[in-house]
Amino acid sequence: MIRVIELSKDYPVEGGGQHQVLKGVSFDVAPGQKIAVLGQNGAGKSTLIRLLGGLELPTGGRVERMMSMSWPIGFAGGVHSMLTGNDNIRFVARIYGKSVAEVRDFVEDFAQLGRFLSEPVRTYSSGMQARLNFGLSLAVEFDCYLIDEVLAVGDSRFQQRSHDELFVKRADRSMILASHMPEIVRSYCTRALVLYRGRGKLFDNLDLALDIYNAF
Amino acid sequence: MILFSFAVPGRFGEWCDAIMSRMAEAALGSVTVVGANSPEEMATDLIRSEGANFLVRGPQPGPWLSQLLRTTGKPFTIALNDPREAAFDLIFRHGLDMADAVRRVGGSCASMMSCVALPGVLVLNASRDWHQPVRTTEMVARHFGVPLDNESIERIVGEVTAAGLGPEAVPPEWLSDPSAESVIQIIDGAVSPYVDHFLGAPFGPITWSRELVMADGHVPAIHAVDVTGRVRALLYGPYISVPPGNWTAEVVLGFSHEATEVNFIIDILVAGKQLCATSIQPSREGIYSINLSFVIDEGNAHPLEFRVVNEKPAFDGRVALGRITLTLQHDAPHLVGPLREELGLAT
């Protein structure tokens, strides 16, 4: 179970003051549950994903993690741009106590970066970076995956591979998926968290959640 | 022979119906009772009957029947009871819920208002006529030209009294129950203007409390309604008809802070046709009074539907109904006449 309790996040704005991106968002994620996060640009989807992944600390509230949670899949901050692909692989493997060889084999096979794994990540295109991030994220098994609008990267073959890895091979895992795409929401999720002006509301009815989201 | 009798629901109406049935049987032989809720119902009952004498009765003579009675001048009776007591009777004796009882009594009173001035009417009033049953029965018989001797009249009155239809107050223990006070207030607000009007006073404002209106989910609107969701009627009802005329409605609504992000449509409909509408997106949380004006035409006896609808799917917010107050406008002739003439309207 993941419990999000009255989560808030403020950012300072130029000239003084604070911009409150999230205001007291609360919801639970049960094992195996897949929740879509819907909201217009600037509604706080990525902020929420980063807070859930522990990449930032909330201004208020808390996240109780009773299951292992990935960092945001596709999140560029998950790799160090000055290191090579292989260096990043070794880094992640060591943090999570995984075999370097196993992680490397998986990422090589998944991301299809070939010799570029020996090059610094800063030399990669954005698509190559996303594929490396994605591969690294999936190389470690988590109970709950955080996905921030990254399912559409790469060519159709890569997208199919991503789909299979996430939603077929890991169908029993929880997911929190930020997306603008109704077909992805309807295909993979059973509930939807709609964010609006910093507030969040969880809906069991996906069609209703999409209607409300589309009305903004 | 066809006799026409209309009564506000309740014991006095039942007493009048019983008197009229026995009176007609005594004078004319067997009498078939026919409903007057619609021309179709009346025609069907008449056609199916083998009899030659009919008693047409109901709580709410429709405009079609009122018009016929107006043009033919046929004799008929209207039995008026204190609408409040009529509503209590429906609740206490017939087990109706309060909203249903108010609907029936309110609708009946509204239609009666159109009939009290018709040429063939005999108005019976419970407070006066129920306690003088012999005199009242004589009066009714004379009105319809039904020949009855004193012995027959007294026998009829005795039979009806023995059947338990004599005047009887609602048991005082029910009225003294503390929980009855709020019910009394709700009923009073909805029907007391008719009490005053039937006694000759001007028609005062009708107040429909939240208990008479429905909320999303088809529950009484006694709590704030969550606006979250698709476009829909958040508040609707109470489906009570009102007399013809120019009306204003004051609707008191409360909005939560989150509801200020929503635009609400407030309208009034009759038979599915919108009579008036307005919209409000509250500038801040709080209580608002929204006013609408509408006209109920002569011959329109359909119940009124008031609605509050969110214009778009809503993320959050709550709205609560305070009350609806309807006021019949009495146009100042010196203003209305010249305006109508200028617009080429019928005067």
Image (cartoon, rainbow, N blue to C red):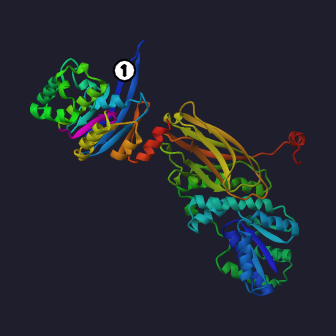
Q: Which amino acid does label 1 sit on?
A: Tyr
* Residue bounds of the magenta highlight: A141-153
- In the image, A148 versus B157, the foreground residue is A148
- Residue A56 visible in image: no
* A178 on left or right of B195: left
Q: In this view, does A198 lie above or below B101?
A: above
Q: What element carries label 1?
A: strand
Task: Name the quadrant containing residue B322.
Answer: top right
Residue B273 percent across, percent down from the top left: 69, 52
> Count the marks: how many?
1
Residue B327 percent across, percent down from the top left: 72, 46
- In the image, A66 versus B257, the foreground residue is A66
Residue B77 percent across, percent down from the top left: 79, 70
Chain at tag 1: A
* Residue at the image position 71 percent from the left and 64 percent from the top: B81
Residue B33 within the segment the image draws in magenta: no
* Residue at the image position 69 percent from the left and 42 percent from the top: B292
- In the image, B15 versus A159, the foreground residue is A159
Local crowd size for mark 1, using a 10 Å CA cut-off: few (<14), some (14–19), many (≥20): few
Residue B16 percent across, percent down from the top left: 73, 73
Which residue has dot 1 on it?
A11
Q: Is residue B61 above or below residue B216?
A: below
